[in-house]
Amino acid sequence: MKHILTKNLTQTEATNLLKQCKTFHYNQDDIILHATDNREGLFLVLSGMAEVYIPSQKSQDEVLEIIKPNELVGLSNLHHFLITNFPQTQQPDPTTPLYPDQLLGQPVQHNQTLVEVRAIYDTEALFIPYTVLKEIWSEPALRDYLLDQVSSRLHDVYHSLAEQINMSTTMGPTADPTILRVQDIMQPSQATIQAKTTDTIQSVAEKLSKTSTTTAAIILNNETIQGIVTMHDFVNRVITRGKSTQEPIETIMTENPITIPRTAYYYEAFTTMLLNGIKHLPVTNENNLLAGLVTMTDLLQAKQPTAMLQNTETLKTVTKEELPQIKQQLYAMLTTMLQQQVPILTTLEVMNTLYDQLIQRCIELSIKEMSTDPPIKFCFYLMGSGARKEQFLLTDQDHFLVYEGVGDTHDYPDGHSGHIATRYFEELSHKIVTNLELAGYKRCKGDMMASNPIWRGTLGEWESRLHEWTLNATNDRLLLSQNFFSHRHIAGDDRLHQQFQQKILDSLDRAKIFLYRLSQLERENPIPTLEQPIRSMFRRNKKQLDLKKEVLFPYHHSLQILALMHGITYGTPIEKIDQLHDKKILSENFQKDLKASISTILNYYVRNRYNQHQNGEELTSTLTLTTLTTREKEELMLSIRLIKELQNHMLSYY
């Protein structure tokens, strides 16, 4: 054996030294050192791999570091070997280690530790007693080697510890969403205004006028919730329509209102209101009967989330001058949701609902700046993260525009109106880009915006583009199509949108080669294969993972191709997973597991980039693995493995 311990010794000296050592074989998961063991020497890993961990009986063991071949086990107890704080009379030479068993009259002290060491795989390790180290301690090369080992490991431990502490404190104090439930903040049923479906409008209005604590009444029929009436309904459905106040309340109530269980968490009520544009939620008990009412005001008083929440109508009425201020209000909303530990898919759903409203308002403002209303019907589409409903920080603009052309409608007796429409939507597209820029969306560096003629056109022009992309599938066109097929309708005519989707579906009938070329691109970019436990990739092998490049992009592309193969041309990634399940392409278990896995990946991705944004750092998609706990590492490994299964499933068709 040629090693630092023996390389400067003669063959005889090395042989005699190694005779005092012993080689041990450990099977996978065998304990090399127990926490209760007295450490009487070091282990040199010859082959295999070991891990140092904190044993736990209540939860998963926490791995601290990985020990690879030619590295030492037991360095944390080396200070007991190097101890020098004994009386000088018993230690005449302070540079020579003195062992506890050499102290006259002193009992041997066993130095227990909180950590254990076990084999990750079948491992061979050489046990080197401290008595052997003592014999060769005067060798400078040995001391340099041990110093390098100790300092390297100390650096890794401190670096990992600092990163984990930084990650845990960056978000600031967080509230546990499991603590606060709807029943803790709702108005109980006895304090809620209730009425029967046959009560008159006037009688219910009189009940509401006598209280200042609520602005809604729950309408019941045999104790079952039948509807809800708000003060807004009295204004819009009674006063403005001149409706008789003697008619029954059921004529103006919102039937079968959205309800929420009293055991639901705060964030569930919070996001339900935001996503559905409502401010009142009837609360139900275990028997689905009325338990109370929770309002947006109740939520605000309970948590004081952000000023943005106190005026959810702001986005619908914001002026062009106010656009630059909206971004920070939306980011305040994001901060609140991340701090409240709202599930990431729910957070993204809420944020993208608000971003949709912002974009729609920018489009409205742009149309108002035009000299006339649109001459024909049009549709505006998002691409990229906004289209996938995965946007949390405002990114570059990524959109295109479709409008009617000659032959799409009877409005065009000749080509003159077509030229008018072309000029109109060219000008409108530039105004939309300008207003989105004011709101915080940077211009796309690749010019994938409706202001670019290749991302704007009639149905017929888009049909020609799709035909060109699918027929001549060059790498450049494949990249364009990957972005295009993630589109989402954000504004415009629904009927035209359906016509456009049919054009896309028709184009795929002749696109087998195109889909094959897309699949080959993904074959060249496989999701990382984490054959071994991800924890074994840390320290010097792999400390970082590019979540966007190595995981999210392959996931999106694989899902996109699989969906297109089965005639699914539209929907967010989550919606496409559900559609593939409906078509029996994905099993129910795989559907659920895949959504859970992508939720895990997105959670790391969002929080990592959010922390970079908060710290004023350059935004990257690189996740530093040393910041994760053992449980998080295992969770990440399993999630990536499942997403790779999706990619493999798609590639199996080719």
Image: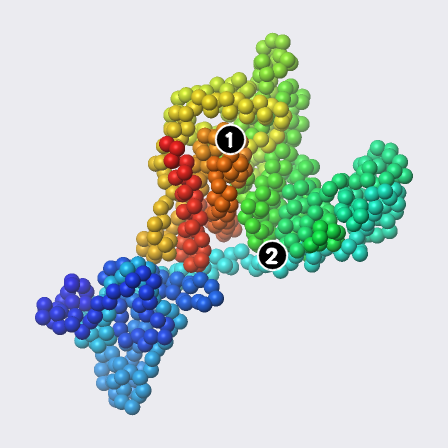
Q: Amino acid at mark 2?
A: Pro
Does residue 625 appear in this view?
yes
- The colour scheme of the drawn protein is rainbow
Q: Which residue is mark 1?
A: 568
Q: Amino acid at mark 1?
A: Ile
Picture quarter containing residue 380?
top right
Q: CA distance from mark 2 to mark 1?
A: 37 Å
Q: Position of residue 579 (x, y in %)?
A: 53, 36
Residue drawn at x 42%, y 50% is 638
Residue drawn at x 55%, y 25% is 501
In the rendered view, does 235 fall on the left or right side of 363?
right
In the rendered view, does 613 fall on the left or right side of 95?
right
Q: Which residue is mark 2?
A: 177
Mark sitting earlier along the chain (2/1): 2
Does residue 444 appear in this view?
no
Picture quarter containing residue 537?
bottom left
Of the pair 71 and 573, the residue shown nearer to us: 573
Q: Residues within 10 Å of mark 2 (few under 14, many from 20)?
A: some
Task: Please tell me whether mark 2 sits on a helix, a strand or a loop.
Answer: loop
